Amino acid sequence: IIATWHLDVLQFSNLSTAYYLTYGIMQIPVGLIVGRYGVRLSLIFSSLLLVVSTLLFANNNYYSLALIARVLMAIASSFAFICLFVLVMNCFAKRHHGLTIGLSQFITTMGPLLAGGPLIVVIHHYHVAWQFAIDCVGLFGLVFFILAFFLFTDNDSVSRKKYSEKKDEFLSW
């Protein structure tokens, strides 16, 4: 990545900073969006945005576009954990919430850590460009988008009803 865009160390670190700062900031707005529009629409929108931003990141020649793509990737990624929380709250008994949320946090933290190693091995072993590897990850996201579109139902209307009832209460203080 550094060689592709001729980056210095500060510019390279800004790619990560842009992602994590945006991801953190987006947690509250995403919570409101998921509460308003539900898990299905949120996952469909965010997975499509993640595919587009991942492909933009890997297939451009400009650092500025890469930075914008990282911000868009963070916005899209921020939906995943919030949607997971909502699904846990709606699909599991209350006594299992702590365990399922804890396991979910563990898996979502370990996933990228464990995926990085094999991705580097594939890049080096098969002598493929990092852009090709990221394109493959982006296309895998396209599969998730299709699955989200067809497999998720709009059963989270109960969540939206609860959100609507609580919204006025929350905003009134």
Image: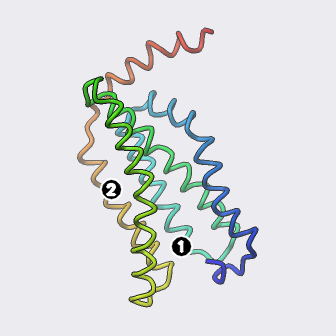
Quarter occupied by residue 38: top left
Quick check: 40 above or below 36?
Answer: below
Q: Where is residue 50 drawn, in percent x and y?
A: 47, 56
First reached walking from the N terminus: tag 2 or tag 1: 1
Q: Give the distance between the C-alpha atoms of the residues marked 2 and 1, in whole angstroms.
A: 19 Å
Left/right placement of residue 64 relative to residue 90 reads right
Location of the C terminus (image quadrant)? top right
Left/right of residue 144 with respect to residue 33 in the rendered view: left
| Residue type indicated by callout 1 | Ala
Give above or below for 136 relative to 32: below
Q: Which residue is mark 1?
A: 58
Circle 2 Cα neighbour tier, 10 Å, few/some/many (<14 / 14–19 / ≥20): some
Quarter of image, res 14: bottom right
Number of numbered tags placed on the structure image: 2
Q: Is residue 152 left or right of residue 58?
A: left
**Disc 2 marks which residue?**
144
Q: Residue at x 49, y 68 (%)?
A: 55
Image location of residue 80, percent across then percent down: 43, 45
